[in-house]
Image: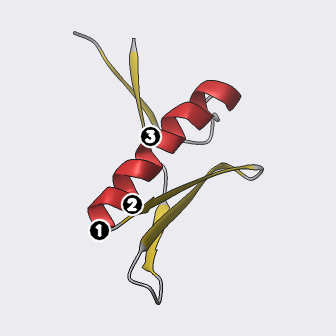
Amino acid sequence: MRHQVTVPYTVEQDEDGMWAAQAALTPDAFANGQGETREAAIEDLREALVVLAEAVGVPDQLTVTVEVG
C-alpha cells in the first residue's frame, strides 16, 4: 500500500548558491535536503522524508491519501 503525505517545507539558497530544503514531519522529527538546484534540494528532502516516515511513522495530524491500484 502506498501513502501520500503532505508536509509543508521551506527552500532557501545560501550565499554559495547551494539550495537547502527543510521540513518537520513531527515537532521532534526534522528532515533536510540539499542540491545545486531548487528542484534537486526538494527531491533530496523528499527522499529524506520517506526514510524519516519509515523510522518514526506518519503522524495523525498530517493528510494521508491512500492510492489503490
In this view, the residue in front, 15 or 66, is 15
Along the horizontal axis of the image, is 14 left or right of 52? left
Mark before the other along the chain sequence, 3 or 1: 1
Residue furthest left as drawn:
69
Where 64 sits versus 1, above or below? below
SS state under label 2: helix
Residue drawn at point x = 62 percent, y = 41 percent: 61
Q: Are marks 3 and 1 in contact (CB under 8 Å)?
A: no
Residue furthest front as drawn:
16
Where 22 sits versus 53, above or below? below
- Residue 63 in percent (x, y) is at 48, 39
Q: CA distance from mark 2 to mark 3?
A: 10 Å
- Residue 42 in percent (x, y) is at 37, 57
- Residue 25 in percent (x, y) is at 61, 46
**Amino acid marked by disc 1:** Thr
Give the quadrant of the C terminus.
top left
Circle 1 packing at 10 Å, graded few (<14), some (14-19), many (20+), is some
Residue wearing tag 2 = 41
Give the quadrant of the N terminus.
top left
Q: Are marks 2 and 1 in contact (CB under 8 Å)?
A: yes
In this view, the residue in front, 11 or 25, is 11
Circle 2 packing at 10 Å, graded few (<14), some (14-19), many (20+), is many
**Amino acid marked by disc 2:** Ala
Residue wearing tag 1 = 37
Q: Is residue 6 visible?
A: no
Mark before the other along the chain sequence, 2 or 3: 2
In this view, the residue in front, 66 or 24, is 24
Residue drawn at point x = 32 percent, y = 58 percent: 40
Residue wearing tag 3 = 47
Q: CA distance from mark 3 to mark 1?
A: 16 Å
**Amino acid marked by disc 3:** Glu
